[in-house]
Amino acid sequence: MRRIQVSTQSRSQMVNITGQVQREVQASGISEGICVVYVPHTTAGVFINEGADPSVMEDMENTLERMVPWNGPYRHGEGNAAAHVKATLVGESVTVIVEDARLQLGTWQAIFFAEFDGPRSRSVWVRVIQG
Ligand code: ZN
């Protein structure tokens, strides 16, 4: 398994990690298979969406904030219940096909690490499986 470190600067932040994941694919030496990207945290996640226009990520953050406001009638005593809920909404892993040692993403797609309780230093686990 390979690891990527992601440092976030604010409570909510979407970080494009496509380049880092691609580097791990290359370092694995596997040219055909699948790449699993997994976030081992309960208040962060990972998803694939548009990487070309940054306003899409702004819309994503703002919409999630409207759906799951930071201050709400939550029971979780740690004060970060919204971050747990958002992490579950976006999910904790993505799987991408690898061919010719390249992640096979659509033209506008990118892999985003989603921070919901930053700023923090986070880990992302990457496993490339031949096949
Ligand atoms: Zn918590």
Image (cartoon, rainbow, N blue to C red):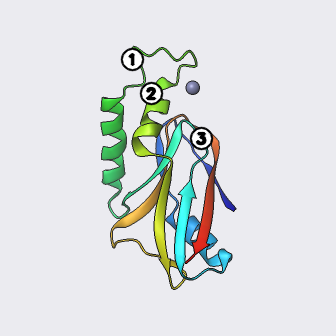
Q: Are marks 1 and 2 in contact (CB under 8 Å)?
A: yes
Which residue occupies 63% across, 46% down?
A: 122
Q: Splitting the image into four quadrants, where does ligand 1 fall?
A: top right
Q: Is mark 2 within 8 Å of ligand 1?
A: no
Mark closest to the chain's N terminus, 3 or 2: 3
Disc 2 residue type (three-letter): Ala
Q: Which residue is mark 3?
A: 41
Which mark's residue is nearer the viewer, 3 or 1? 3
Q: Which residue is mark 2?
A: 82
Mark closest to the chain's N terminus, 3 or 1: 3
Residue 6 sits above or below residue 127 on the image: above
Residue 39: percent from left, percent from top: 57, 49
Q: Quadrant of the N terminus?
A: bottom right
Query: How many residues crowd around disc 1 within 10 Å: few (fewer than 14), some, or many (20 or more)?
Result: few
Which residue occupies 33% across, 73% down?
A: 107
126 on left or right of 12: right
**Kind of element beneath mark 1:** loop
Q: Nearer the viewer, residue 32 or 80?
A: 32
Could you tell me how far apart the alpha carbons at marks 3 and 1 are, in whole angstroms? 22 Å
Residue 77 sits above or below residue 86 on the image: above
Residue 102: percent from left, percent from top: 51, 79
**Kind of element beneath mark 3:** loop
Could you tell me how far apart the alpha carbons at marks 3 and 2 are, in whole angstroms? 14 Å
Residue 59: percent from left, percent from top: 30, 45
Residue lying at the far bottom in this picture: please name it: 100
Disc 3 residue type (three-letter): His
Query: How many residues crowd around disc 2 within 10 Å: few (fewer than 14), some, or many (20 or more)?
Result: many
Q: Quadrant of the C terminus?
A: bottom right
Residue 22 sits above or below residue 7 on the image: below
Q: Which residue is mark 1?
A: 72
